[in-house]
């Protein structure tokens, strides 16, 4: 019966091909990972876009004084120009933010106005905030800089007279033509480009309408820039330096209309998850100076945290990088990479250690374990395993942080891990399944064969103050490795 022999032979071949050595016996994964280098910034696109945006402005002719500073706008996303507001600014109210930024510093003169009898020009520059008029009995520099101190983000004022403005002369209650314009960035005399020349008075009969003109336009900047306060859910990493990050894990960039770290944080928090790298974990904010003039403010977003060691893009062509700072999102999950298990330097595993606890099913053995073994890890040497490490049973295990999480009541969080159900190959791993539980309630999970991939909570979860996170799954030989878990504020 040659056919039968063939069958036996085939069966034997299949068995040997499937002879999986369990992870606990230091078996080799059946599936070999392909590592693709994570993307780095497209600096040419950033420079090209910086040459397209126009974020320069000054006081509009007809605007009343003392308007609120408008919300930060996004002027470009990934090379496309837009005009949108920032999604949801940090939980801090603008009152709080104002308190934090209040400063009583001195001002230095950046440029003088021309003599009173000559026509001058007002600034048109980036990060225009709002303006006021000050008492024009004298050239009232002090009143202007004092007012700047009360405006959130104000670091520079442009003080000038504007003549033939009907609204200033007759309509607005202040009855002053001495304008004090606040900016969130420092501008130079080369940016004095608004010479007036607009009609403002009503036409009377055939008389010529006088045109607006400007005199004595001077610029004053705070003599020390305060460091911005670090956004909620982030830690300050580096800066300010003249180098933007050129680091792996780049997700894209946005331009915003002022140097606003809270706005960058909001953009990072709401940036869609990268299919390979997951959510945004780091942003780099910097100011682009083109031909010596502040032009735009970049938020570059990354799914891999970085630091000053990669902040080596100093600009290109006419574009110079200034005020570059890095901020990393802080995970409230201790040892989410399982790197804290260091009982050996080669190969070992355990059912628990200081940071994590593994629990087997009733009558199960080693259904939830932690490994020191770089080949099983996504990064570093540590990873967790669900499914009996020595294939003693086919029951599910549970891993949890050793202590309840240090969450804040009412705050929303996003749980993200990387999981691999590939160890024993596609056929066995088809049965793989892991659930993520938050206080016992399923918030996400994954099933079936896969290499290390992002697995996250399907929606943000709400903290109660002492939350319990767990991962349940595995059924040897359908093992699942877990690594690089994070819990970020949503
Ligand atoms: C953004 O808005 C400004 C003022 O409303 C407008 O001048 C500009 O063309 C807009 N830009 C885009 C890209 O929509
Ligand atoms: C002050 O401003 C008012 C209103 O614009 C104007 O009528 C007046 O001439 C100004 N005084 C001086 C000294 O410029
Ligand atoms: C303006 O109007 C007045 C009276 O209507 C007339 O006498 C005068 O010539 C006009 N001036 C000009 C420049 O048209
Ligand atoms: C910066 O990041 C690199 C790569 O992640 C790391 O090796 C290095 O230790 C970090 N340096 C600092 C000062 O944190």
Image (cartoon, rainbow, N blue to C red):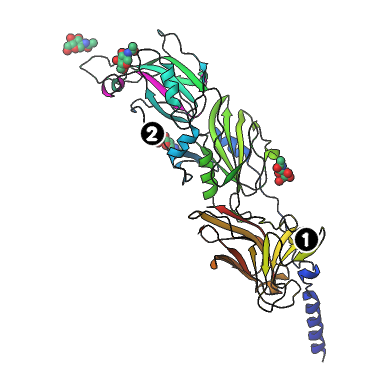
Q: Position of residue 126 (x, y in %)?
A: 49, 29
Identity of the residue furthest to the bottom in this view:
1
In the picture, measured across the screen, residue 20 lies left or right of residue 142, that is right
In the picture, measured across the screen, residue 394 lies left or right of residue 205, that is right
171 inside magenta stretch: yes
For marks 1 and 2, the one nearer the N-term is 2
Q: Which residue is mark 1?
A: 373
Secondary structure, mark 2, is loop
* Alpha carbons under labels 1 and 2: distance apart: 57 Å
Label 2: few (<14), some or many (≥20) within 10 Å?
A: few
In the picture, measured across the screen, residue 376 lies left or right of residue 274, that is right
Image quadrant in which you'd find residue 136:
top left
Q: Position of residue 93 (x, y in %)?
A: 44, 42
What is the magenta range?
A: 168-188
Q: Which residue appears at 54% of the width and 39% of the height? A: 261
**Would the CB of label 2 be found within 8 Å of ligand 1?**
no
Q: Which residue is mark 2?
A: 68
């Amino acid at each position: 019966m040659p056919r039968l022999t063939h069958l036996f032979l085939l069966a034997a071949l299949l068995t040997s091909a499937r002879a999986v050595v369990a992870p606990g016996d230091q078996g080799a994964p059946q599936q070999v990972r392909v590592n693709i280098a994570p993307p780095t910034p497209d600096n040419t696109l950033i420079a090209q876009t910086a040459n397209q945006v126009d974020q320069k402005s000054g006081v509009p002719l007809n605007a009343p004084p003392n308007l609120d500073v408008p919300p930060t706008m996004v002027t470009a996303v990934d090379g496309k120009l837009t005009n949108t507001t920032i999604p949801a600014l940090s939980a801090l109210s603008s009152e709080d933010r104002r308190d934090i930024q209040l400063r009583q510093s001195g001002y230095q003169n950046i440029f003088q106005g021309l003599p009173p009898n000559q026509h001058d020009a007002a600034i048109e520059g980036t990060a225009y905030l709002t303006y006021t008029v000050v008492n024009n009995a004298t050239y009232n520099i002090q009143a202007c800089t004092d007012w700047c101190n009360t405006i959130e983000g104000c670091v520079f004022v442009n003080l000038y007279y504007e003549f033939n403005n009907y609204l200033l002369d007759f309509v607005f209650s202040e009855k002053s033509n001495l304008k004090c314009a606040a900016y969130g960035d420092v501008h130079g005399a080369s940016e004095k480009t608004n010479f007036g020349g607009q009609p403002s008075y009503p036409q009377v009969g055939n008389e010529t309408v006088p045109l607006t003109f400007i005199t004595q336009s001077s610029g004053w900047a705070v003599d020390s820039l305060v460091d911005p306060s670090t956004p909620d859910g982030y830690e300050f990493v580096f800066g300010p330096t003249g180098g933007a990050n050129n680091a792996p894990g780049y997700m894209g960039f946005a331009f915003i209309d002022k140097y606003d770290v809270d706005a960058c944080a909001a953009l990072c928090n709401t940036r869609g998850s990268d299919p390979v790298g997951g959510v945004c974990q780091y942003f780099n904010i910097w100011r682009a100076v083109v031909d010596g003039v502040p032009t735009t403010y970049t938020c570059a977003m990354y799914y891999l945290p970085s630091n000053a060691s990669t902040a080596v893009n100093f600009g290109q062509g006419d574009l110079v990088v200034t005020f570059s700072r890095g901020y990393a999102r802080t995970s409230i999950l201790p040892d989410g990479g399982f790197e804290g298990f260091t009982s050996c330097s080669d190969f070992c595993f355990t059912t628990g250690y200081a940071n994590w606890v593994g629990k087997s099913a009733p009558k199960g053995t080693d259904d939830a374990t932690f490994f020191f073994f770089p080949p099983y890890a996504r990064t570093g040497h540590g990873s967790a395993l669900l499914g009996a490490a020595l294939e003693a049973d086919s029951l599910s295990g549970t891993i949890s942080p050793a202590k309840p999480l240090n969450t804040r009541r009412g705050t929303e969080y996003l749980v993200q891990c990387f999981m691999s159900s590939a160890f024993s190959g596609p056929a066995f791993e088809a049965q793989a399944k892991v659930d993520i539980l938050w206080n016992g309630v399923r918030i996400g999970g994954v099933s079936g064969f896969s290499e290390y991939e992002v697995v996250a909570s399907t929606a943000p979860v709400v903290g109660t103050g002492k939350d319990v996170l767990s991962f349940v799954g595995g059924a040897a030989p359908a093992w699942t490795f877990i690594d690089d878990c994070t819990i970020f504020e949503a």
